[in-house]
C-alpha cells in the first residue's frame, strides 16, 4: 500500500462492495451500517478481514494522482479475483475492473482515456462495470478486444465511443441477485 495514502472522505467501497463474513453481511450498493459519511468506518480496528484485506488501486498505486480517489474520480479501480471471461491469449495475473460510480469525475477526461489506452496497449485485461443496484451483482464487460482497433488508431473520438458502448452494454446486461450466506 502507498505510505502516503489514506481514504480521507472516500467511503466508496463501504457502499459498493458486498460483505459476506460471519461478523457482517452487507449487500452491494447499500451503505454499511458502520460507515459514517465522509469519515469512514466506525469499527475500524474491529472491521471484518474482508474489509481490512481490500484496497482499491488508488490506495496502492502512486501512479494514480489524488484526482483518481474514487469519490472524486467516480471510478473505482480494483484487481479482480474472478478471472472468468478473459480469452486465453491474455495474461490473467493482473486483471483490472473499472467500476463506474458516477460520471462527474474523470470518465470523459483525456487522463482516463489515456489510462484505458495504455493498459490495453500493454495487454492488461480490463473490464468496465456498473453497479447492478442494491443487492444485485455489477455487470461487467471485457474491454480489450472490442476497443483494440480504436486504441490502435489513437483516435480519441473512436476510443470514447467504444468505451461508452461498453458501459451501455454493462448497464443493459440482465442483473443477477447476490445471495448472502444465511439468506
Ligand atoms: S474505495 Fe479506496 S479510497 Fe475509497 S474508501 Fe475504499 S479503499 Fe479507501
Ligand atoms: S465494516 Fe467498516 S470497513 Fe467494512 S464495509 Fe462497514 S464501514 Fe466499511
Image (spheres, rainbow, N blue to C red):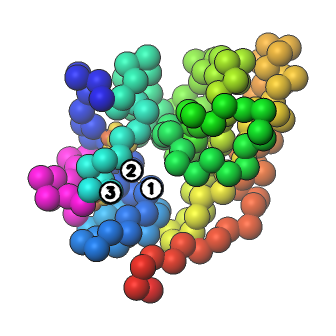
Q: For the residue carrying disc 2, how many other residues have a C-alpha within 10 Å: few (<14), some (14-19), or many (20+)?
A: some
Q: Quadrant of ligand 1?
A: top left
Residue at the image position 74 percent from the left and 67 percent from the top: 174
Residue at the image position 66 percent from the left and 57 percent from the top: 139
Establish whether ligand 1 lies closer than 8 Å to the Cβ of label 1: yes
In which quadrant will I find the C terminus?
bottom left
Q: Mark 3 highlights which residue? A: 50
Range covered by the magenta-colored residues: 34-48
SS at mark 3 in the image: helix
Q: For the residue carrying disc 3, how many other residues have a C-alpha within 10 Å: few (<14), some (14-19), or many (20+)?
A: few
How many angstroms separate mark 3 from mark 2 (CA)? Answer: 11 Å
Quick one: 53 or 167, which is closer to the camera? 53
Q: Which mark is residue 41?
A: none
How many angstroms separate mark 2 from mark 1 (CA)? Answer: 5 Å
In which quadrant will I find the N terminus?
top left
How many angstroms separate mark 1 from mark 3 (CA)? Answer: 13 Å
Q: For the residue carrying disc 1, how many other residues have a C-alpha within 10 Å: few (<14), some (14-19), or many (20+)?
A: many
Report the number of numbered marks: 3
| Residue lying furthest bottom | 183
Residue 91 percent across, percent down from the top left: 66, 31
Quick one: 107 or 52, which is closer to the camera? 52
Q: Which mark is residue 16?
A: 1
Do residues under tags 2 and 1 come within 8 Å of each other at their CB atoms? yes
Residue at the image position 52 percent from the left and 48 percent from the top: 81
Q: Mark 2 highlights which residue? A: 13
SS at mark 2 in the image: helix
Residue 10 percent across, percent down from the top left: 32, 42
Q: Is residue 9 visible?
A: yes
Amino acid at each position: 500500500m502507498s505510505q502516503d495514502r489514506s481514504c480521507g472522505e472516500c467511503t466508496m467501497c463501504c457502499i459498493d462492495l458486498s460483505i459476506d463474513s460471519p461478523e457482517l453481511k452487507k449487500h452491494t450498493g447499500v451503505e454499511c451500517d458502520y460507515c459514517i459519511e465522509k469519515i469512514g468506518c466506525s469499527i475500524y480496528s474491529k472491521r471484518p478481514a474482508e474489509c481490512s484485506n481490500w484496497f482499491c488501486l488508488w490506495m496502492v498505486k502512486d501512479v494514480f494522482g489524488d484526482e483518481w480517489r474514487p469519490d472524486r474520480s467516480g471510478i473505482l479501480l480494483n484487481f479482480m479475483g474472478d478471472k472468468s471471461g478473459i480469452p486465453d491469449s491474455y495474461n490473467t495475473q493482473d486483471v483490472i475492473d473499472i467500476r463506474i460510480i458516477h460520471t462527474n469525475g474523470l470518465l470523459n477526461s483525456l487522463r482516463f482515456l489515456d489510462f484505458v489506452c495504455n493498459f490495453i496497449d500493454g495487454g492488461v485485461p480490463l473490464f468496465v462495470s456498473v453497479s447492478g443496484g442494491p443487492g444485485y451483482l455489477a455487470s461487467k464487460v471485457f474491454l480489450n478486444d472490442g476497443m483494440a482497433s480504436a486504441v490502435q488508431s489513437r483516435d480519441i473520438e473512436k476510443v470514447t465511443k467504444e468505451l461508452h458502448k461498453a458501459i451501455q452494454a454493462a448497464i443493459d446486461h440482465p442483473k443477477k441477485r447476490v445471495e448472502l450466506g444465511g439468506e
